[in-house]
Amino acid sequence: MGTPLLRVEDVGKNFGGLSALSNITFDIGDDEMVGLIGPNGAGKSTLIRIITSVLKPTYGTVKFKSRDITGLPISDIVNMGIASTAQIVKPFRRLPVISNAMVSCLCPRIRRTGDWVKSVELRARDALEFCGIADLALESASVLSHGDLKRLELARAIATEPELLLLDEPFGGLNQAETTLIAKSLRRLHKGGRFGRLHSEGPSMLIVEHKLADLMKIVDRVIVIDLGRIIAVGTPEEIVRNREVVKAYIGKEEGQLVS
Ligand SMILES: Nc1ncnc2c1ncn2[C@@H]1O[C@H](COP(=O)(O)OP(=O)(O)O)[C@@H](O)[C@H]1O
Ligand SMILES: [Mg+2]
C-alpha cells in the first residue's frame, strides 16, 4: 500500500472525565472497504464524527491524502471527497426526495464539474436510482419508511461522489431483504459500478455495523474497538476467530459474533 487515502494517527477523545477514544491509529487504503465493529459505547460513532470533523479530537491527527484535515470545516471535508451517513437519519422532511438528493449536488466539489446546473437533477436521479428509490423521487421525504430514509441518506452521500464514504450503521432498522439490497449496492458502488462521473473507481469505505454476518460478506478488512481502543485488526475470517473479539461481544451483548 502506498500513501493511504486516510490516516488516523494517535487520535483520542475525552468527553469531560470520560475517555471515549484512546490512541487510535489506522489507515484506509485507496481501494479498501473496511468494517469498524465493537460493542455499544465502544466509540465507533465518535470516531466517524472525528474523521468527518463533526467533532474535534482531544489529541491526534486525521490525514486525507497526506493532508492534515483535523478540525477543518465540514464543508471543506465534503469538498475534498469525504462523505458520510449518520446513525440517525436527518432528511429535509418537507422537501421531495429528489430535492434532498439535489441539495448534495450543490456542493462546490460537484459545481466544479462542467455543466453542473443541467446535470444536478440527473445526478440526483442517478443517486436515487442507485439506491433503489427513484420511484419515490417526487414524494415528500416525510412519508418515507425507515428503510427508504436509510436509502435516501445513502443517496445524499453518494451524490457528492466521494472518494471516501463513512457509513454509521447503514443496515440499522432494516429487515433482512432491505439489508441484503443495500449491502449489494455498497459492494457494487465500491467496485466502481455505473454510478459516478467524477471518479471512474468507486469510493473506499469505512462501515460501522452491528449486523456482522452481512458486514463480513462485503468488507476486505475489519477493525475492532472496545472501550475506545483498537483490540484487533484483520480479515473477516481472522476476526470471527479472534478470542478477544468474541469475548468483548459475548461479555457485553450475549450474542454470537456472527449469527
Ligand atoms: N457528545 C457526547 N458527550 C458525552 N459523551 C458522549 C458523547 N458522544 C458519545 N459519548 C460517549 O462516548 C462513548 C462512545 O460513544 P459512541 O461513539 O456513540 O459509541 P458507539 O457508536 O460505539 O456505540 C459512550 O460512552 C458515549 O456515551
Ligand atoms: Mg454508534
Image: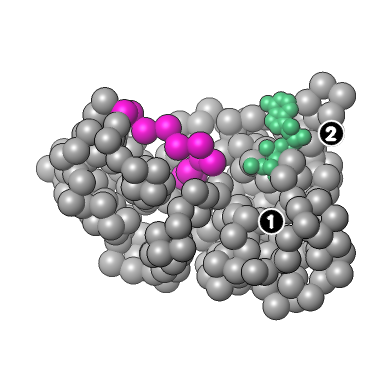
> In the current view of this chain or complex, which residue is farthest to the left?
118
Q: Is residue 15 magenta?
A: no
Residue that appears at 24% across and 56% down:
129
Q: Could you tell me the amino acid type at mark 1?
A: Ile
Taking the image as shown, residue 241 lies to the left or right of residue 213, namely right
Quick check: which quadrant has ligand 2?
A: top right
Give 130 or 110, whichever is nearer the viewer: 130
Give 83 or 217, whichever is nearer the viewer: 217
Q: Judging from the image, what secondary structure is the residue with disc 2 in?
A: strand
Give 59 or 206, whichever is nearer the viewer: 206
- Residue 209 x/y as whole percent: 60, 55
Q: Which residue is mark 1?
A: 37
- At label 2, counting other C-alpha atoms closer than 10 Å, the crowd grade (few under 14, some 14-19, many 20 or more) is some
Give 114 or 205, whichever is nearer the viewer: 205
The magenta stretch spans which residues? 83-93
> Measured along the vertical axis of the image, is residue 2 above or below residue 198?
below
**Quadrant where the C terminus is found in the figure:** bottom right
Q: Is residue 213 visible?
A: yes
Q: Which residue is mark 2?
A: 19
Residue that appears at 58% across and 31% down:
54
